[in-house]
Image (cartoon, rainbow, N blue to C red):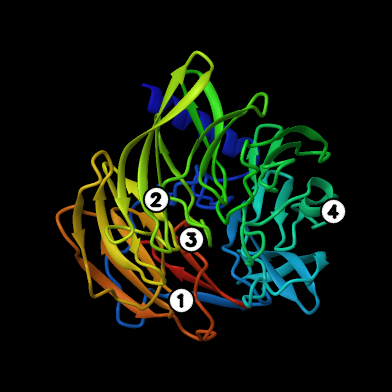
Amino acid sequence: MKMRSASRTLSMVLLAIGLSAADWPQWQGPDRTDLCRETGLLKSWPASGPPLLWKAAGLGEGYSTPSVAAGRIYAMGNLGDQECVIALDDTAAGKVIWSTPIGSVRSNGGGMPGPRSTPTVDGELVFALGMNGDLVCLESATGKPRWHLDLVKDFGGEMMSQWAFSESPLVDGDRLLCTPGGKDATMVALDKRTGAVVWKAESPSGDKAGYSSIVMADVGGIKQYVQLTGTGLIGIDAASGKFLWHYDRMANHVANVSTPIVRGNLVFCSTSYGAGSALVRLERVQDGIEAHEVYFLPGKAFQNHHGGVVLVGDYLYGGHGQNKGVPVCIEFATGKIMWRHENPAGTRSAAVLYADSELYFRYENGVLALVDASPAGYHERARFKLPDNSGKPSWPHPVIANGKLYIRDQNTLLCFDVKKH
């Protein structure tokens, strides 16, 4: 009953803000899990891939994964000397509707120029974070700015290392959440309509920002925001901004990237550079929340550099290795490695998406593979090389919305038909 009730509530919210239940309005989808709920999708492709509906240009330089909402696609890119948020018409072959500069291109992101955050669409508003810390609220219809903040100047924000801000902002009711990092404002809650500060959360260790994005959890009646920072996992009380807990064994000091996975009172997270992965159990205590390690997997067992991990049923799936995307299946509750496929379809890191019993592994060299989401073993159904590959790392995550697969590669957005007909 609880699951059906939650599903009805989500459907009502989507309808109220003009979205369809199959839209993808933010980073990793409606609930930030990279689990697409659509069914009736293709189970195999020809060697050339699924049918290409259209190809659009105009997204500029960058690694931003697109969001899809109410017939539009939203992305970010460097256009000339300006970092921009861009809206495209999904019904007109990706024609650019508007492009709004949010700040000058001041940083090359450690040799990887261009934004890498996903715009968050919330009805009439869209929120985005630039690589230099420019946080903006725009009108989704026109791109007109509503407000602008600078995470560095306004909050003393600090990144853990050289690769610039990469977080995708989270909307929760009337609030917008993000992670400036640093001793004064590890995380902040803002009034989404005005940008006014609701609270600033400080972690005891002054955690600098990592490259991850916030997810929500509810443990023992305490609603909280869970984030992977520069020093590890943290939990912040949603109502007050109070620091609740910290866990750091699986963190590294170079780049903590993957979005945490929350199920009930359990949190899984993985980082690379030899660090590893862990499952943490959160427990309600009198003074708040305590984090207890359930298991730890050393880097040689499983480390996700970037590209993320998905939880499907009782099993985790993701790419293993630093700058590698070796497909691995892990039992969520125990950490047992169910299988590892040492001969992946593509090379280097892989971004992963789940839809209709299948995993979509998008490799850095532009290969996309369709793999069964099964703990029984690795079974690849299809693979193809993306057309017109830019030659730069293919990092944006695959997105499926309304029966269409969207793949961004720098200035180009590809739209494929993956619905059975």
How far apart in space, not on screen, are marks 4 and 2 (Cα)?
33 Å
For badge 2, the amino acid type reads Glu
Return the disc, 4 or 2, that comes first in the chain's sequence.
2
Return the disc, 1 or 3, that comes first in the chain's sequence.
1
| Residue 120 or residue 73, whichever sits in front | 120
How far apart in space, not on screen, are marks 1 and 3 (Cα)?
14 Å
For this orientation, the residue located farthest to the top is 286
Return the disc, 3 or 2, that comes first in the chain's sequence.
2
| Residue 81 or residue 56, whichever sits in front | 81
Q: Which residue is mark 2?
A: 38
Residue 170: which numbered mark, if any?
Answer: none
Residue 52: which numbered mark, if any?
Answer: 1
Mark whose residue sits in front, 4 or 2: 4
Q: Are marks 4 and 2 in contact (CB under 8 Å)?
A: no
Q: Which residue is mark 4?
A: 145
Q: Position of residue 340 (x, y in %)?
A: 21, 63
Residue 120 appears left or right of 223: right
